[in-house]
Amino acid sequence: MAYKITSECISCGACAAECPVNAISQGDTTYVIDADSCIDCGNCSSVCPVGAPVAE
Ligand code: SF4
Ligand code: SF4
């Protein structure tokens, strides 16, 4: 299990600052989550203004 960022992402960067394992980085059109690093804490989903990170 890992979180994934959907196309709703507006690239605000809030989630990357709150990820405890630095699994989130800026991608081409949205921020992206490294599924191998994600520990499923849910912080990114909590802080995202548009609900883009979702649990897979
Ligand atoms: Fe990082 Fe937690 Fe979001 Fe995974 S669920 S990407 S560990 S903030
Ligand atoms: Fe995208 Fe939400 Fe992360 Fe902002 S907090 S970069 S909108 S996923």
Image (cartoon, rainbow, N blue to C red):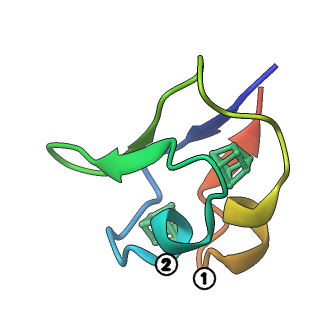
In the image, 29: left or right of 5?
A: left
For label 2, the crowd category at 10 Å Cα-Cα, with few meaning under 14, some 14 to 19 and many 20 or more, is some
SS at badge 2: helix
In the image, 45 versus 41, the foreground residue is 41
Choose top left, top right, bottom left or bottom right for residue 2.
top right
The nearer-to-camera label among 2 and 1 is 2
Residue at horizontal 67 percent and vertical 57 percent from the top: 20
Q: Residue 49 location in percent, x, y?
A: 60, 82
**Residue 49, label in figure:** 1
Position above or below: 53 against 12 = above
Asked if the beta carbon under badge 1 is closer than 8 A to the nearest atom of ligand 2, the reply is yes
In the image, 4: left or right of 32?
A: right
**Residue 14, label in figure:** 2
In the image, 13 versus 51, the foreground residue is 13
Q: Residue 36 location in percent, x, y?
A: 59, 17
Amino acid residing under circle 2: Ala
Whether residues under marks 2 and 1 lie with C-beta atoms below 8 angstroms apart, the answer is: yes
Position above or below: 18 against 42 = below
The quarter of the image holding the C terminus is top right
In the image, 23: left or right of 13?
A: right
